[in-house]
Amino acid sequence: MKRSKYGDDFLNWTRRAGRGLEREEAMRRVIHSIPFGKVSTYAHVAAAAGYPGYHRQVAQLLRREGHTLPWQRVVGAGGEIKTKGESEQVQRHLLKSEGVRFQGERVDMSACEYSFRMWEVWG
DNA sequence: ATCCTGACCCAAG
DNA sequence: GCTTGGGCCAGGA
């Protein structure tokens, strides 16, 4: 089977039918569960929602309806702020006002990353 | 169907 | 620290 350099578009297409809504709802719940003063990452939010590998859809969801969510608490891997321009300044300000610590340009993940209490799930 | 583009991630060089 | 290439998934043209 030949594989397009853009991925197996046909297989992706077959998976698209309808599934998006419950996935987005799960992601919204996960994002809402990030506590004040903590952050998580796109990849961890996706995985905690039950959809590992869907970090790009987390970003898409936040861009569409972030105004209804604690969007500022979702950052890139390693604590990197991924928003651009004015949103970036707003995000930094909101996080600092919640007491989130920074190391240079990045969030101090060792102190502020939320683990979704996974230690209670697998030991 | 195919191509392109994202508030992404990660291993290499 | 960089940059690059590959992988990932969905939605629009």
Image (spheres, coloured by chain):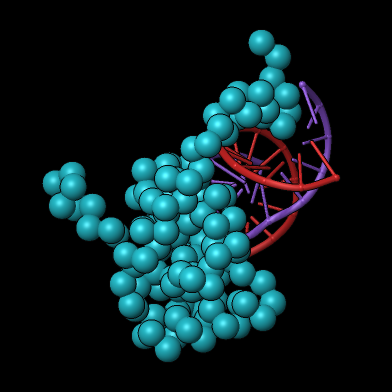
Chain colours: A cyan, B purple, C red
Could you say which is closer to the camera, residue A14 or residue B13?
Answer: A14
Residue C7: % across, % down: 59, 33
Q: Quadrant of residue C3 in the image?
A: bottom right
Image position of A98 (left or right of A84): left
Q: How many marks?
A: 0
Image position of A2 (left or right of C7): right
Residue A111: % across, % down: 32, 73
Q: Is residue C4 above or below residue A37?
A: above
Residue A45: % across, % down: 41, 55
Let me know if residue A8 appears in the view: no
Q: In the displayed image of the protein, which residue is found farthest to the top?
A: A1
Let me know if residue A115 appears in the view: yes
Residue for point 60% across, 63% down:
A63
Q: In the displayed image of the protein, which residue is found farthest to the bottom?
A: A97
Residue for point 69% across, 77% down:
A85
Q: Is residue A69 above or below residue A47?
A: below
Residue for point 14% across, 46% down:
A123
Residue for point 39% across, 80% down:
A100
Q: Is residue A117 above or below residue A34?
A: above
Residue A120: % across, % down: 15, 52
Could you say which is closer to the camera, residue A34 or residue A111?
Answer: A34
In the rendered image, the quadrant that contains the N terminus of chain A is top right
